């Protein structure tokens, strides 16, 4: 195994590195077959090629070293040994990430935390822009809704009574202007004071009654 003879020689010749031969009676170097992608043969005289490990791939014929088995890149994984193509490295799903090279399992893909997001095949999660938020495991962020304000760390908080926000992705709530009030939380506007009442301060929750 792993050798050949041209005839009329004292010894058999080992197949070169990167090739193999299983059997007996090989009469030519051409009987030594190159290792296929996903395998390699170190040294000479190999009967079989060795398989690249799960989490790696090797796309060339005739590889001579395990070092030629390349790790799946960050954001991907592969449970398949003897992989002959990088396409066997599967991308982590959107909303997850992996900073590991040569990962062998989907379990290495970690869920993005609240306030972050990722596309598929991500090495890390990206923080939502100011005024936007996300749930854990999200592939995108959504703007804070009207009636809320951005608090930081991807959190939107309701506007307090006496204030409002009328547009999405608001960074702050606005105090009710003079002549208006708002008793409710999470408001998108303030109510103009009715006849017989007034508001001489900003941020009031109730209009004041006029003196009799």
Image (cartoon, rainbow, N blue to C red):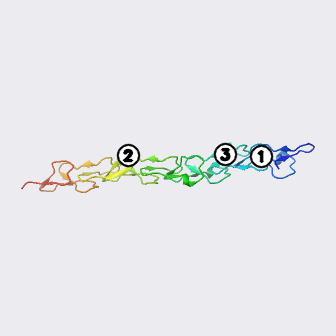
The secondary element bearing badge 2 is classed as loop
Comes first in the chain, label 1 or label 2 = 1
The picture places residue 46, in percent across and down from the top left corner, at 78, 47
Q: Please state if 123 lies on the left or on the right of 26 as rendered.
A: left
The picture places residue 209, in percent across and down from the top left corner, at 12, 55
The picture places residue 130, in percent across and down from the top left corner, at 38, 46
Q: Residues within 10 Å of mark 2 (few under 14, many from 20)?
A: some
The secondary element bearing badge 1 is classed as strand
How far is disc 1 from disc 2 in space, using C-alphas? 58 Å
Comes first in the chain, label 3 or label 1 = 1
How far is disc 3 from disc 1 in space, using C-alphas? 16 Å
Q: Nearer the viewer, mark 1 or mark 2?
A: 1
- Whether label 3 touches label 2, CB < 8 Å: no
Instruction: Decide which of 49, 32 is in the foreground and name it.
Output: 49
Residue at left offset 39%, top offset 49%? 154
Q: Please state if 46 lies on the left or on the right of 114 as rendered.
A: right
The secondary element bearing badge 3 is classed as loop
Instruction: Decide which of 67, 176 is in the foreground and name it.
Output: 67
Residue 19 bears which disc, if any?
1
Residue under pointer 2: 130
Residue under pointer 3: 69
Q: Nearer the viewer, mark 3 or mark 2?
A: 3
Residue at left offset 59%, top offset 51%? 77
């Amino acid at each position: 195994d792993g050798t050949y003879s041209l005839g009329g020689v004292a010894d058999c010749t080992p197949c070169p590195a990167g090739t193999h031969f299983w059997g007996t009676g090989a009469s030519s170097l051409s009987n030594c077959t190159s290792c296929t992608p996903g395998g390699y043969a170190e040294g000479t005289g190999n009967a079989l090629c060795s398989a690249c490990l799960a989490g790696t791939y090797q796309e060339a014929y005739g590889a001579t070293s395990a070092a030629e088995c390349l790790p799946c890149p960050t954001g991907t994984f592969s449970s398949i040994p003897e992989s002959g193509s990088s396409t066997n490295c599967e991308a982590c799903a959107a909303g997850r990430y992996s900073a590991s090279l040569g990962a062998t399992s989907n379990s290495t893909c970690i869920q993005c935390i609240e306030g972050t997001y990722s596309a598929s095949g991500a090495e890390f999660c990206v923080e939502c822009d100011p005024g936007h938020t996300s749930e854990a495991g999200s592939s995108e962020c959504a703007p804070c809704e009207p009636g809320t304000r951005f608090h930081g760390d991807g959190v939107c908080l309701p506007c307090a009574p006496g204030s409002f926000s009328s547009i999405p992705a608001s960074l702050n709530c606005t105090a009710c202007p003079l002549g208006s009030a708002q008793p409710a939380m999470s408001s998108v506007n303030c109510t103009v004071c009715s006849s017989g009442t007034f508001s001489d301060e900003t941020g009031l929750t109730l209009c004041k009654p006029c003196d009799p």
